[in-house]
Image (cartoon, rainbow, N blue to C red):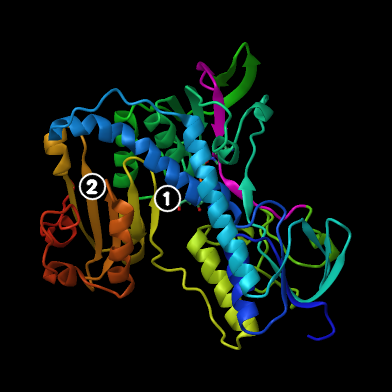
């Protein structure tokens, strides 16, 4: 690839792009990367990382109250949004700096500006510099979908929510997916009056029905008002507030309206029309198992391809791309049994199939489930429950789905995913001695098949 300025040009320094750039450079490729915002991408800068920090912040509210049951006297706690935002900013800046340092150490040339594609082997930077590349990797990520109702411009997305100059004491969150549920929990925990408006009759479509019910219950217990089966008709600016009118005729005056109605691949204005790269109806770049587009020199990884939009998947796709193209090690990403969590309060951790998916796939399915009061709730007196559910293919005894709702569900499911990935049977779970006292022990002590009452 000596005729080109670089062997690899990566557009987008998020999780997928940074991993691909570093690994390719490690194989000796001459690599450049362009980022128009901050190095680290959505996950580090305005996604998973700040979100989890805010989830931690929000959960102290319960801890202060629960402490009384364990003998503590806690003075009236006060919360400073400004201090949280500032602390988050310090951490995000630190992490972004580490990403940048690692890229530099790997020998990757960093361009802190937008880049667009101008041909099958060419990109142009915002300052007008043209760069030719043997391979172009598009890792531009995704962006929040905007609303199309009157006043949509008065709403914010999760990106703005992290840095609001003032804490919204009253907020409407619109949507019923990962982001809506996580932010409803964050704002409620931090003391806001939260109304969640969702067009469906249940939140978290695609998750197991029991999980969906448990999360809705948990949100209500934490004071979130659920307006289900309804949609925003209009948002208007009224004195000192946003007035939300729903299609069902509900009117609410709030400080902020946050939309979390999905994310779409950021492929508009990327210059792809200068190539014949194919995109689907949502604008996602279409790629094969090795993340290659129909143009042999152009690849794409991460949310821009709209496959499984999770950070660890983007990282795997970026790594597999570099191994395949620059390491002579053809590698494909395995998308099965990927554990996922919704950092709601209560937290959700799942791996594998829902009960309905398992029934559709295998026909005969055994279900084991428990819904119990966690030990901590005995002294705290909190009306809390943990839900655990194991879905088993009856013919083979293989565990095909594990679903947990409750404290530390994400931590539990990461390890349960190892067993499920290895093909563990229910008998293997049963053979595992319980660790007592823990909530997770329930996963290896469930013995009675659940039958619908
Ligand atoms: P999701 O796709 O998870 O949810 C979108 C929600 O918006 C759904 O409830 C959907 O309803 C609703 N919706 C879609 N279109 C409209 C509309 N026109 N009007 C009203 N409601 C609408 O998207 P998110 O934005 O929450 O998250 C994007 C992705 O980011 C996730 O799918 C996930 O892959 C990733 N993510 C992962 C996280 C994690 O791993 N913890 C955290 C955050 C994001 P319906 O169900 O009826 O379609």
Among the 4 quarters of the image, the one containing residue 372: top left
Residue at image position (12%, 37%) is: 378
Q: Secondary structure at mark 2?
A: strand
The tag earlier along the polypeptide, 1 or 2, is 1
Q: Is residue 118 left or right of residue 41?
A: right
Which range of residues does the magenta coloring cover?
247-268
Q: Nearer the viewer, residue 291 or 314?
A: 314
Callout 1: CB less than 8 Å from ligand 1: yes
The C terminus lies in quadrant: top left
User: Residue drawn at (53%, 78%), measured in percent from left and top?
Assistant: 332
> How far from the left and from the top, in percent, is residue 222?
32, 30
Local crowd size for mark 1, using a 10 Å CA cut-off: few (<14), some (14–19), many (≥20): few
Residue 29, percent across and down? 69, 82
Disc nearest the viewer among 1 and 2: 2
Instruction: Give above or below for 211 relative to 139.
Output: above
Residue 161 appears at what percent x and percent y?
Answer: 55, 35
- Mark 1 vs 2: CB contact within 8 A: no
Where is 307 relative to 66, above or below? below
Q: Which image quarter holds the N terminus?
A: bottom right
Asked where in the image residue 116 lies, by quadrant, the reply is bottom right
Name the residue tied to disc 2: 387
**Magenta span contains residue 260:** yes
Looking at the picture, tell me which residue is in the foreground, 88 or 182. Answer: 88
- Would residue 442 appear left or right of 389 to someone viewing this image? left
The residue tagged 1 is 206
Q: Nearer the viewer, residue 340 or 35?
A: 35
Residue drawn at 17 percent across, 31 percent down: 72
């Amino acid at each position: 690839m000596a005729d080109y300025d670089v062997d690899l040009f990566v557009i987008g320094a998020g999780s997928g792009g940074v991993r691909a750039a570093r690994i390719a450079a490690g194989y000796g490729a001459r690599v450049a990367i362009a980022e128009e915002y901050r190095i680290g991408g959505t996950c580090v800068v305005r996604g998973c990382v700040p979100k989890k920090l805010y989830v931690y912040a929000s959960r102290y509210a319960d801890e202060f109250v629960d402490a009384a049951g364990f003998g503590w006297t806690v003075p009236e706690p006060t919360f400073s949004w400004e201090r949280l935002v500032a602390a988050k900013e310090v951490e995000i800046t630190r992490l972004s700096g580490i990403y940048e340092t690692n890229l530099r150490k790997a020998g990757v040339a960093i361009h802190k500006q937008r880049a667009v594609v101008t041909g099958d082997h060419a990109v142009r930077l915002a300052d007008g510099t043209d760069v030719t590349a043997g391979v172009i990797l598009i890792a531009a990520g995704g962006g929040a979908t905007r609303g199309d109702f009157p006043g949509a411009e008065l709403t914010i997305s999760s990106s703005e929510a992290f840095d609001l100059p003032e804490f919204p004491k009253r907020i409407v969150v619109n949507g019923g997916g990962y982001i809506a549920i996580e932010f409803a929990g964050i704002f409620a925990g931090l003391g806001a009056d939260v109304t969640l408006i969702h067009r469906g009759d249940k939140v978290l479509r695609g998750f197991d029905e029991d999980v969906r019910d448990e999360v809705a219950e948990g949100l209500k217990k934490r004071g979130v008002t659920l307006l289900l089966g309804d949609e925003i008709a209009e948002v208007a600016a009224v004195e000192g507030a946003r007035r939300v009118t729903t299609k069902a005729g509900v009117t609410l005056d709030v400080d902020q309206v946050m939309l979390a109605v999905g994310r779409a691949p950021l492929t508009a204005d990327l210059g792809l029309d200068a190539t014949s790269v194919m995109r689907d109806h949502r604008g996602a770049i279409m790629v094969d198992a090795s993340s290659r587009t129909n143009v042999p020199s152009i690849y794409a990884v991460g949310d821009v391809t709209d496959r499984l939009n999770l950070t660890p998947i983007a990282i795997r796709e970026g790594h597999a791309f570099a191994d395949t193209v620059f390491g002579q090690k053809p590698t494909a990403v395995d998308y099965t049994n990927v554990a996922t969590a919704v950092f709601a309060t209560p937290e959700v951790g799942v791996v594998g199939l829902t009960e309905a998916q398992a029934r559709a796939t295998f026909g005969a399915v055994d279900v084991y489930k428990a819904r119990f009061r966690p030990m901590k709730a005995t002294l705290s007196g909190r009306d809390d429950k943990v839900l655990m559910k194991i879905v088993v293919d009856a013919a083979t005894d293989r565990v095909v789905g594990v679903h947990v709702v409750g404290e530390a569900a994400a931590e539990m499911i990461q390890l349960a995913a190892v067993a499920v990935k290895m093909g563990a049977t229910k008998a293997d779970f049963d053979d595992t001695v319980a660790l007592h006292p823990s909530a997770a022990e329930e996963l290896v002590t469930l013995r009675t098949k659940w039958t619908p009452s």
